[in-house]
Amino acid sequence: MRRYSPVRRLLVLSSKYGSGVFLMIILVVFFVLYGWINNTKSTTTSTFTTTTKEDLLDCHYYKNKTLSSDGSSDGGVIFSNGRNTLYPGQLPGYTGWARPEYTLARSFTIQSISNSDIIQVGKEFIITVQCQNCAGNTSRRNDDKDKDNEVNNESLFFLRAYGKSVVPGTVTKRSNDNNEHDESNTIYDIVFLFFDSGIYTIEVVLTFSNPPSIYKFPLEQEQEQGEEEPSYEGYLLPGFPLIVNVVIDQDDVQKEDVQGSSSSSSSSSSEKIQTQTQLDKAVVLPVVYCKSNDLIETSFNSAIKKARWIIIDQDMEKDYYSTTMNTTLISKLNYYDTNRNSIGINMEYKYNNNCLLIPEFAFDKNLHPNQRAFSKCYSDSVLRIQNKMLEKLLLKNGGIPSTNVTFQFHFLSLHGGYRRNQIIGPSNVTQFLSDIQKNDEVGIKVILFNTGLHDIHRLCGSEFSNERKEYLTTSSISSFSCVDEYKALLIDFVTVIQDFPAQLKVFQSTTAAWPKYGNWGIQWDHNGQRMPLVSDFSAVFNDIAYEVILDANNNYDGIDIMDGYWITYPRPDNREIGDIGNKLSHPGSEVVSAMSRKWATLILDRICT
């Protein structure tokens, strides 16, 4: 399955604006769009102040926006209710590769549902499921000190809920309430956190019933003994999909009306949740662009509490058609060309505190053609779709307008993963950055980097066992664990980035690639999907990345982390499908756009002064 493997790339972009130089160096799964306009303009009506597109594009306009004690602002945007709810069955079901007959899905039952009478916005909703007569094998070890000891096995799941928004779920395994040593009946707590009221469809999909420990991969010795990589199952548990009604706690609404936004001006803005009541009432909301503490993560799961995908609109007209595919068989199923997903549902990534990402129309050259500066970057396996989108946003209608802004692009391909390239080439990150530093003019530098998907496939997949011998030592291969190797190479990689002088250095966590839900227009193989090619591996590798970068002992104080996993995890319906290629490991244009604007907004907050 090499066609699903990402290609790592480095991009260096230099943008000269007047006498200043913006040098951007990117090693990441995504691309960057960045633009701003300096002139602002607002118009006032009898009831509220509206904000024009010009306002939304000005970094100084954003930076000067503050909330008064009553929650008002000198500018605002209107949110109103529209065709913004997904009902059961509106998002596609499983459409993946052939599934194995063996599964423990039928052995699961719903044991309990917390707050089953009232499911409230902003509060955890927990579903407890139990697998009866499920004997565990082994799973990941507890820590590096206990390398040879392994804890009991855990089943793996895909967890998603959709209604007015699409949100991911998390799962925690716990011991049997009656007998903690009884592993025949395993219990899992599945947690969802809703930020919008309404009817939701909850999916709990069993991806692997009884998988081997990810720490055992690659399974070379096991395969010699007849044990193969398990195949993705993709079965809904009994009792699912589950339909629930999420409501707003009226006590919280009353408190919010009394307190306004004065509750904590010094607290993290991501803790202030904009309720659906305010959205439904078309309340004028303050215009505040997202800050660093909204965009930077402090733990693997912190992004779940900050933002979600909300439904903006649905295109279900009879004449709805696709402009991206040249086949009548699926012409009514794709709308990637306008950032719609595979069944015509338009979503936007919204932060719970109502802060804004730079909008796509910020890149419209017709707004202020003589007062704009761009710096754009793209790399990695999503290169084709990113390049296509960049052309549409930056080069359409005659290209970049006449300004004193110039661009220079330099790419470094890391196809095959970081370790392989550092040892046998053809690319070397250290040498590449050294050359950039020698030839570069003095200016601002920002770095967004990632290595993950390609390392997972190359290091953990059994099909690359012979290739690994080309760049791993014989001694390491004899006791080789792809998870341990990833941790070691990531330490090397981050150290190289740490030594490079840049004003902003951000690691983008690895995307939840290779999902098996809701992909149209792809001809699937008839064999099963092997375990390394699933989102669960990305989660484990991201755990390692957070551990390495946030460990105070490693002294990586100047490197931040931005989420790429949870923003992609609940959106397997939006994948790269179109005239630029079919890669299900790549996010679709709607998802890539949000990720790009996150990066651009972070640069805006840190760099634009």
Image (cartoon, rainbow, N blue to C red):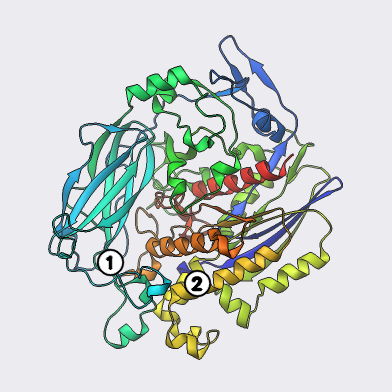
- Is 227 in front, or is 552? 552
- Residue 185 screen position, x and y as percent: 15, 61
- Residue 572 screen position, x and y as percent: 40, 53
Q: Residue at x 48, y 85 (%)?
A: 476
Q: Is residue 344 above or below residue 384?
A: above
Q: Residue at x 53, y 17 (%)?
A: 70
Can see residue 91?
no
Quadrant of the rendered image containing residue 385: bottom right
Direction from residue 80 to residue 26 in the image, left or right: right
Q: Which residue is mark 2?
A: 486
Q: Residue at x 36, y 38 (%)?
A: 194
Q: Mark 2 is on which residue type?
A: Tyr
Q: Is residue 245 above or below residue 330?
A: above
- Identify the residue at the far bottom of this view: 474
Between marks 2 and 1 in the image, the one whose residue lies nearer the viewer? 2
- Residue 165 screen position, x and y as percent: 39, 38
- Is 383 in front, or is 289? 289
Do the residues under discs 2 and 1 have CB atoms within 8 angstroms?
Answer: no
Can see residue 550?
yes
- Circle 1: element type: loop
Q: Is residue 101 above or below residue 323?
A: below
Indicate which disc, 2 or 1, sits on the residue closer to the N terminus.
Answer: 1
- Identify the residue at the far right of this view: 19
Direction from residue 297 to residue 195 in the image, left or right: left
Q: Is residue 519 above or below residue 427?
A: above
Q: Which residue is mark 1?
A: 98
Q: Mark 1 is on which residue type?
A: Ala
